[in-house]
Amino acid sequence: MAMRPALLLPEIVLFLGALAALLGGSFLPRTRQWVTRVVAAAALVLAAAMAAVALAGPTAVAMEGSFTVDPTTGVARLVATLGALVVLALAADEIDGSPRESETYALLLLSTTGTLVLAGADDLLVVAVGFLLTSVPLYGLIGISGTAVAAEAAMKTYLLGALFGILLLAGVTLLYGVSGTTSYVGLADPLAAAPRAVVAAGVVGVLGGLLFKAGGVPAHFWVPDAAQGAGGAVAAFLTTVPKIGAVVAAYRLVGALPDTLAWPLLVGVLAVASMTVGNLAAYAQTDPRRLLGWSTVSQVGYLLVPVAVAGRSDLALPSLLLYLAGYTVTNLAAFAVTTAFPRRRELSAYRGVGRRFPWLAAALVVALLGLVGTPPTAVFVGKLTTTAAAWDAGDAWLAVLVLLNTLASLFYYLRWIAPLYARPTAEHPEDGDPPAPWSRWTAVATAGLSVLLGLGAGVLWAVFSA
């Protein structure tokens, strides 16, 4: 097999865009740092266009078979690059003219590049490289605001990332040691004949690293702290884009394993643990970003359901990709509202917002009910198809627990929706801080996109299932 670097043009463009933003920002005055934002946006748009072109082509492999360019990689590329583009719009309000503006854009592009590498990885060593390229920039992004809360969150993320990074590398070492290969193509047969305890330890280590990147149990503790301590744009990014590559990488890994051990049961238990722990912890939250951080943990549980039924249901992969796209736009809409009101750090502070800013409040309602899985949003179709995939694979217990956790999540989202249309008080007057313009319209646009994507996916689902 040839190297074929042209197949990795989206990743190459993002990496070069990050270097251009970093170097260009070193020579630009602070009043003109917006130029680096234009460079970053151009790189993301170009990468998305290249991903769309590659999506229409045939499946191919690059880098001696260690990287696969197929429809799964194409969808992940599109969702990740367009999601990062939305984050740049949020950053326009938050870090415009700040001392670390160009560095922020460079780190965002580097982490997005790592996400794309994870999504197409067909080799354990490439998974390790993608993990590091995605994770290391996040540590800087979380702490770049310089506040005490951000520093604490960055340190917690770094320590957990180091721990689970070591576990991932140890898992790769064990699997290579008993199989003699790191390529997914030749992994199944040697692992089937290898000692089960060693194989189990290796796979658990690799899955642990990917769960850290996705923000799922048991590697989830950093997510709510990072969502609360980081800036709004960074919080929106870290709770959406890196998950795309991590979950797709987990799907590819599980699909390459032999059936000598109960991998579907393991992933199914992790899925239930993530959705349940995230929902229960979200009940006690009063900070909206921290609430969304725990919501992210629960959403990872739903995303793991198609991974648990990989290879046992034809609906597994389509439902995973649809859920990833729907969750990305919906979660970005919710975080865009918090970025529009950076000083409202309590749920009660949103009291009366619906009376003065009806479009922004409507966007938040759509986003929160969308995260629950309410029609006609995209997450509703995603949850419907993932539940159908679990049922189709014979895991009725998993489908039932998805529905029960979905119902349970409704109550803590309603705690945020209820104050929106309540009468203002002296503590929270109607003429409070006006919303940031870019974040305001980004929230409305992404919420509308969630509905349109849900309607389109629903129509296609009805047509093909008829």
Image: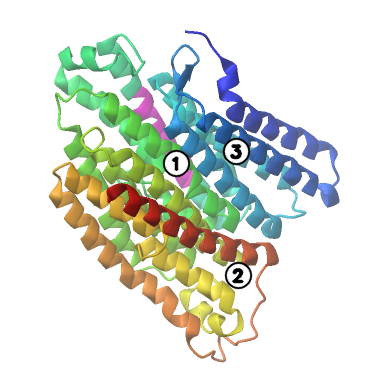
Real-space Cα distance between discs 3 and 1? 15 Å
Compared with 435, 420 (above or below) is: below
Q: Nearer the viewer, residue 197 or 47?
A: 47
Q: Which residue is mark 1?
A: 244
Q: Which residues are magenta?
A: 155-170
Per the rendering, the mark at residue 8 is none
Q: Nearer the viewer, residue 372 or 243?
A: 372
Look at the image and say whether residue 246 sits in the magenta stretch.
no
Is 48 on the left or on the right of 159, as rendered? Answer: right
Instruction: Find residue 237 and report its horizontal and vertical position in percent.
Output: 54, 49
Q: At 48% from the left edge and 40% from the top edge, which residue is drawn?
A: 158
Dominant secondary structure of the residues highlighted in magenta in the image: helix
Give the secondary structure at mark 2. Answer: loop
Q: Earlier in the sequence, mark 2 or mark 3?
A: 3
Per the rendering, the mark at residue 341 is 2
Q: At 65% from the left edge and 30% from the top edge, which residue is drawn?
A: 13
Look at the image and say whether residue 169 sits in the magenta stretch.
yes
Per the rendering, the mark at residue 48 is 3
Question: Which mark is nearer the camera, 2 or 1?
Answer: 1
Q: Quadrant of residue 377?
A: bottom left
Q: Earlier in the sequence, mark 2 or mark 1?
A: 1
Tell how many labels.
3
